[in-house]
Amino acid sequence: QKMPGMLSLLDNSRQSLDVNVKRLTIGSGFKHETMGFIVNYNASLLMEQQDAECRMAESDEIKVGSYEKYQINIGPLFSYGKNGFNASLNLPLTYQHMGWTGGDDNSLYFSPRFSANYKISSTSDVALSYNYRRMPVSFRYIVPIGFYTSYLSMMQGLGEMTYAKHNNVSLSMKYANPVSGLFFNARTSALFQNGNPLLEASMNGNVYITSPTGRRSNSSQYDFSAELTKAFSLGRFTVSVKTDGMLINHEQLIDKKSMSYQMRNMMTELRLSYI
């Protein structure tokens, strides 16, 4: 996949940025049942390569950055289901090789995932899930080249690899009673991120430059949503109340110092429908 781009800048010059992406995924697996569990044995290979070439239309200078990833995943998936209860546990072991302009990195790690669902009755059920991910940062942070992202904004890569660790847990509940016309859904989740690049911003003339500092930051996000619906006249008239909430804790660099900040958001709406 090739993604060419031409951008006009504040000083009337032009930047050409071509990004080539090559990706191949191969996978295989088999399963069997033992002691009430269904066990899937899965193996996969992911190969990915990205190349970026950046040049200014008025200059002969060419900036080149490259990035490659080879990833092998091997691991079992355990599934179980009985009497309205279903659960699965995935324990993939991953070997990952990362190479980029100026360096490389090799790592071995687990990425566990768990989910469970229980049907309490014919009208209600609950679900729980957890997953862990270890993700390399974006290509633009890794390659040691600078390029414009808008006519007056520039991104400068750091030239080193770092990984962000994500832990996510969620809990949901559903209730549906068509006889009484009452319906209720609720979901809450928490996301914890560790190791994200801590960015700093600076001005060079009229150009706003963003670049990773080599330092790491932590963040967390909490989400909640719920909706209660009541139907009347065989569903022809419905009244719904819905609320959504979000809380984010983050870090940013201000005057060379890491500062914490928090963002909170909540919205509630009332909806009436008549058919």
Image: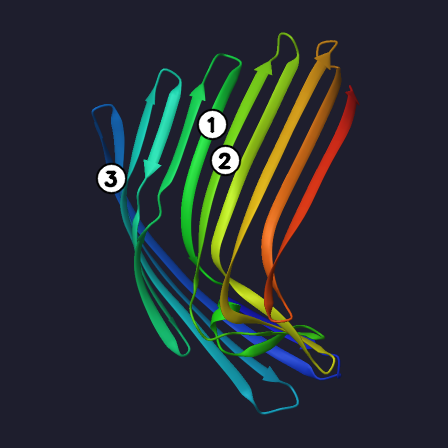
Q: How crowded is mark 2: few (under 14 residues within 10 Å), some or many (20 or more)?
A: some
- Taking the view exactly as shown, the residue that stands out farthest to the bottom is 60
Identify the residue position indicated by label 3 in the image.
Answer: 30
- Mark found first going from the N terminus, 2 or 1: 1
Kind of element beneath mark 1: strand
Q: Would you place residue 77 above or below residue 119 in this image?
A: below
Image-quadrant location for residue 17 = bottom right
Q: Would you place residue 95 above or below residue 175 in this image?
A: below
Q: Where is residue 106 in the image (x, y as percent from the top left)?
A: 31, 65
**The C terminus lies in quadrant:** top right
Q: Nearer the viewer, mark 1 or mark 3?
A: 1
Residue 47 circle label: none
Kind of element beneath mark 2: strand
Dot 2 amino acid type = Ser
Q: Which of marks 3 and 2 is in front?
A: 2
Q: Position of residue 155 (x, y in %)?
A: 60, 73
Residue nearest the observer in this picture, 46 or 10: 10
- Mark found first going from the N terminus, 1 or 3: 3
Is residue 125 visible in the rendered image? The answer is yes
Residue shown at the point (50%, 31%) measured from the top left: 171
